[in-house]
Image (spheres, helix red, strand yellow):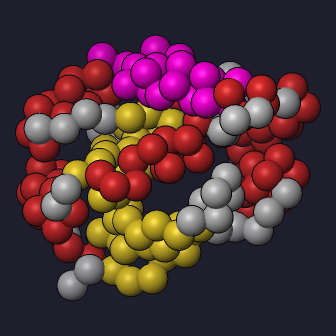
Amino acid sequence: MTCKNKFLLYIFLLYNISMETTKNELSPYSKIFFSKLSNYLDTKIYYFGSIQRDDYFPKSSDIDIDIFTNNEKSTMLKLQNYLNIKKSDIHKFVYKLTKNNRIVHGYKVKYNDEINNFSTEILVFNEIHKNDVLYEHNSKIILPFYISYLLILLKYTYYNLHLITSKNYINLKRKLLNGVYEKSNINFVIIESLR
């Protein structure tokens, strides 16, 4: 193993532990929500995305989480029940990991609670993909300064100034994180909604 790979493995293990907590403070409502969800599903929750970085905007940014299970269908039924959502709100996807070029399947749920100003995106994967997915998501925690700065500027323009549309915001954010930082195309494709 090269020195660079050892260093990356060390960073991965370090951040893998911290993915069970967040860099940015969760709201009291969010803390309770995720604690109850974790207990209900009897599994750990791993936080990734802006909640772990400097470009997180409280009360505006959603909170991205990973859940790993040995039985995705059972977990999705529990999640559907817990969130009180329709089965069609659950989306199956294919995800090509940029760090090792592996392809994994999973499920995605976007949950919004407007009353409590809370939004989360929940990704559910089989336990066999845990190390690969966490390694992938960890790779976007420590970003180059210019990417962080551009993300903060973009989010401020969208959330606070309302100068760009939601569609443009999502496209620009993807280009920054995937095209500029990862230098790859979008590797996440929804293949179906459950029925």
- Name the residue located 70 percent from the left edge and 24 percent from the top edge: 7
Residue sitting nearer the eye, 16 or 60: 16
* Relative horizontal placement of residue 16, taking residue 38 as reference (left or right): right
In-front residue for pair 121/73 = 73
Say above or below: 104 vs 137. Answer: below
Residue 23 magenta-highlighted: yes
Question: Measuring 59% from the left and 46% from the top, which residue is drawn there?
Answer: 136
Which stretch appears magenta? 7-28
Residue situated furthest right in the rendering:
146
**Residue 35 visible in the current orientation:** yes
Q: Quadrant of the C terminus?
A: bottom left
Visible residue check, residue 22: no
**Image position of 19 (left or right of 124):** right
Q: Which corner quadrant of the image does residue 44 belong to?
A: top left
Q: State the residue at coordinates (76%, 56%).
A: 178
Return the x and y of residue 48 as percentages of the image width and height: 51, 36
Total number of numbered labels? Answer: 0
The quadrant where residue 168 appears: bottom right
> Residue reaching furthest front?
1
Q: Which of the image's four quarters has the N terminus? A: top right
In the image, residue 29 above or below residue 117:
above
From the top left corner, tell me how far across and down residue 132 is, in percent: 50, 50
Towards the viewer: 47 or 84:
47
> Which residue does the image show at 84% across and 36% down from the upper left?
147
The spot of residue 193 in percent (x, y) is 34, 80
Q: Compared with residue 43, is residue 103 higher up or lower down, i.e. above or below?
A: below
Q: Is residue 27 magenta?
A: yes
Give residue 188's position: percent from left, percent from top: 58, 68
Relative horizontal placement of residue 180, taking residue 191 as reference (left or right): right
